[in-house]
Amino acid sequence: MAAAGWVCLVTVLLSLSFVVTRDHRGEIDTFHVSAGHFFLLNCYTAEAHDVVIWSRGESKDNLSLPTGVEVRDRLLWFLPVQMSHNGSYTCQIRNQSGVLLRRLKFWVSVSSGECPYTVESISITKGVSDSLPCKQKEIFGLNSVVNVRWMKDCQLIQRQGKPISVDMKGNMRLPQASEEDNGKYTCLIDINLDGRNYTASRSILLTVKDDLPEKVFVEPQLVTPDKQEITVELGLRVELQCLAFIGYSEDNESSLHWTVGKDYAEDLEEISVSRKTIHREGKVYELVILSIAKVHRKFLNFEFECHLESLAGEQISVVKLKEADRSSFHMSWAVCLSASLAVLALAACFFFFKVNLILAYRDLLAHFPKQQVPDGKLYDAYVSFIHSNAMSSDEGARFAMQILPEKLEEQYGYSLFIRGRDDCPGEAIHDATAAAMHQCRRLLIILSPEAKTEESTCICDNQSQVWYEQKVGLHDALTKNDPRVILVEIDGPVDYSHLPESVRYIKRKQGALKWKKDFLATHKFTELYSKRNFWINLRYHMPPVPTRRLQTIV
């Protein structure tokens, strides 16, 4: 019995000695996290069949964990990190029998900034393209990632040259690193858990080395072309350029060349190839130019391939020649020509049909009445006619007293003041004439071939009245442009040498309308056209008819 007891005691002591030895074997890992962020702590040495127990400090059970920290799937979840969570945490790994296998200690250092502090660093050689690890594998394992973003020195990354890229694991690709890329980079992961949004973060220091180790391999990169189509003209010369970054020295094992189909471009007679090396900001580029002296149709839609071969593999960029689309050029010329012809046609139509267009516009406005500002005028025109004998008097009077009113008043709605019809007997002639003249928008002067207004030919009071009408109206027309004067010649040409200078001036300036009694010796169609043309031109020189008056006529 005593021997059996000693054996049990020795066994227990050996077990305790084994546990203590394992407990002091590893170093404490420190994790720098930001308050308010989500954080997962992994007991990374535990096997799938092991039992994991988390505790705060030196405690031996999960009951010692602070508020906001819980265990899920053997991971320690901080939901989210609080300043009070700063401290040490212990992970006990036991087997299925409860025997302690390992004990790991971790230190969680909590800071208040958005980008946590870090002592972890990585170095990249200047000019080399490399990646910065996000190192949050456990976060991506939750399959709840919404967005991954990187910050430099806790600010948005603003980088010259090629932009950064982020892969599916959150690692940031930094192309052709430069000294400006030195700094602290933070990988921030936005996730959604149980309907709440969290952000997890981890920082790393980047140092870009200025010196290039002798045996560091720099991966060459094709710069141009980038799978493009080039528009060419048949029969003209064209050059295709292939530019590649080959490293920091000309001593490299890369090859840059053009191929046309399965043949090297140098082997074709119609194609010449030249190459040169370019040094730019410490970098070495190689340029290969493929020249075609005269583009033939057989080269169209044919693949010209630029090959860059190096120890990292082969890169290929394809260029195709495409014939210039002349249809768009011809279409542009056709459109311009059509537009020019259309403008000329419109100008010609306006020139030849100006009067008709303006009258049509007036008629159109009549269907859209609007409030008009009164001008104080009662009549559209003052009709004045002169004569020297009975024959001309009869014709002038008939035109003024009968033909004009029938057309202008009864058919088109104008209001005319005609001497001998609208004046009142016994009025002071000169005063009444001046008053009536000021109430008219136009002065319509009817001239006959024998018309004279020289004072030496005055033979009656009737002509004296006409002269006074014209003196008043012409004076206002020349000085105030109100009323405007319309000259109408009836029954043949008028000798203006016997008329006042003011009438001759108006004749030279704007001409005169011509009216014949019966348009004798003319064809019936010509007579109708001439009469219609006369009334159209007369209406053109007359003011527009007020809408209310036109509606009354209709």
Image (cartoon, rainbow, N blue to C red):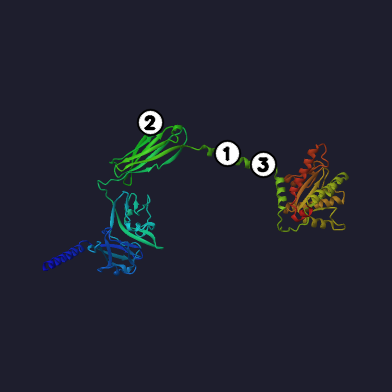
**Cβ atoms under marks 3 and 2 closer than 8 Å:** no
Q: Report the residue that reaches farthest toward the front.
A: 1
Element type at mark 1: helix
Q: Look at 14% across and 67% down and name the residue there.
A: 9
User: What is the tally of numbered marks visible in this picture?
Assistant: 3
Amino acid carrying mark 3 in the image: Ala
Q: Look at 31% across and 57% down and name the residue there.
A: 204
| Spot occupied by residue 170 in the image (x, y as percentages of width and height) | 35, 54
Identify the residue under disc 1.
334
Identify the residue under disc 3.
348
- Position of 238 compared to 385: left or right? left
Element type at mark 3: helix
Q: Nearer the viewer, residue 80 or 293?
A: 80
Q: Residues within 10 Å of mark 3 (few under 14, many from 20)?
A: few
Amino acid carrying mark 1 in the image: Ala
Tell me the quarter of the image containing the N terminus.
bottom left
Q: Look at 65% across and 43% down and name the residue there.
A: 346
**Cβ atoms under marks 1 and 3 closer than 8 Å:** no
Identify the residue under disc 2.
268
Q: Earlier in the sequence, mark 1 or mark 3?
A: 1
Closest to the camera, between mark 1 and mark 3, is 1
Q: Earlier in the sequence, mark 2 or mark 1?
A: 2
Alpha carbons under labels 2 and 1: distance apart: 41 Å
| Spot occupied by residue 428 in the image (x, y as percentages of width and height) | 85, 58
Q: Earlier in the sequence, mark 3 or mark 2?
A: 2
Q: Residues within 10 Å of mark 2 (few under 14, many from 20)?
A: few
